[in-house]
Amino acid sequence: MSTTAFEASSIIFEKKCYVCHGKNKQKGELRLDTKEAMLKGGENGKIISDNAANSLIIERLLLPLDNEDHMPPKEKKQLSKLEIRYLTWWIESGANFERTLSELEFPDSLHDVLSKEEIKIVDNTVPGLEVAAAETKALEILRSLDVIVMPLGENSNYLSVNFVNLLPENHEEILNHLVTINPQLVWLNLDYQNLEEDSWEKIGLLTNLRKLTVRNTNLDDGKLIHFNSLDKLVYLNLVGTNVTAVGLQKIENILSLESLYLYQTNIDKTEFEKLQKIFPNTRIDSGNYFVPILESDTTILTL
């Protein structure tokens, strides 16, 4: 199980704050070791607001050390700049108590705030099993057609592919070669591409895809049906396409889907609650707003 953002915050509080604001002592009537107590605040009111700048906890941490309201008191062990940056990020991310760091897209620049033993981030867009290298000839052909092909990381055989600036007349040939590297291809970016029907059908053959973005393409409900074979998808970006709520029901079998982006589609705002019931374990973004998950945030990923 991945660490939640609140659990990560609690690790900082335990090291630097619980001595005065924990189970055994609540200076200023403030307790930081439970969600309920933190939301309640202390004698000076709530400590978390809708943004970090207006949050009392950040305000007190940033006061000069010799200010009597500075927290922790100057004789106590102080929070590091990195720890303060983490708490600021957490509040700016909505001060969510349930979502994991991976779900909130925990920035790389903050990873050092916690030790490897304390932080457990699971990125399901990267398969856990190793895979053999893709055929060199296929990669050479793809790159000769101006396809951007990149490994997901150092010493990784898994690949990401980006169609940016490709010529439409090369789509069919490129997709034929993508099928040959299906075991290695896990991220695909088709943003701003308008594909023919048979090309969309070939996308459905890329069954190891974990991350797929098709923003501002000619995708519609009829083409979306080809995605129902992509049962390992974790991330799907449909922003700016012509899909509808009815069309999305064609891919409700994708149980591994964690994030679904639907801004500027043909989906009415009244339909998002229904979609959340169809995809109960998926974060649905309707336009910089995530529809609340109704049941569990546990997903099953088939490798």
Image (spheres, grey):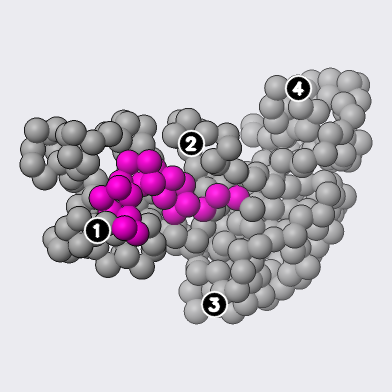
Q: Is residue 27 magenta?
A: no
Residue 178 versus residue 4: which sits nearer the camera?
4
Location of residue 256 in the rendering, given as x and y in whole percent from the top left corner: 73, 59
Q: Is label 3 or label 4 in front?
A: 4
Identified by mark 3, the residue type is: Glu
The picture quadrant where one finds residue 44 is bottom left
Is residue 274 among the parts visible in the rendering? yes
Residue labelled with disc 2: 114
Residue 146 versus residue 39: which sits nearer the camera?
39
Identified by mark 4, the residue type is: Asn
Secondary structure of the residue carrying numbered label 1 = loop
- Among numbered discs 3 and 2, the one appearing first in the sequence: 2
Q: Residues within 10 Å of mark 2 (few under 14, many from 20)?
A: some
Residue 202 versus residue 115: which sits nearer the camera?
115
Residue labelled with disc 1: 26
Q: Residue at x 80, y 28 (%)?
A: 157
Residue labelled with disc 4: 155
Q: Is label 1 or label 3 in front?
A: 1
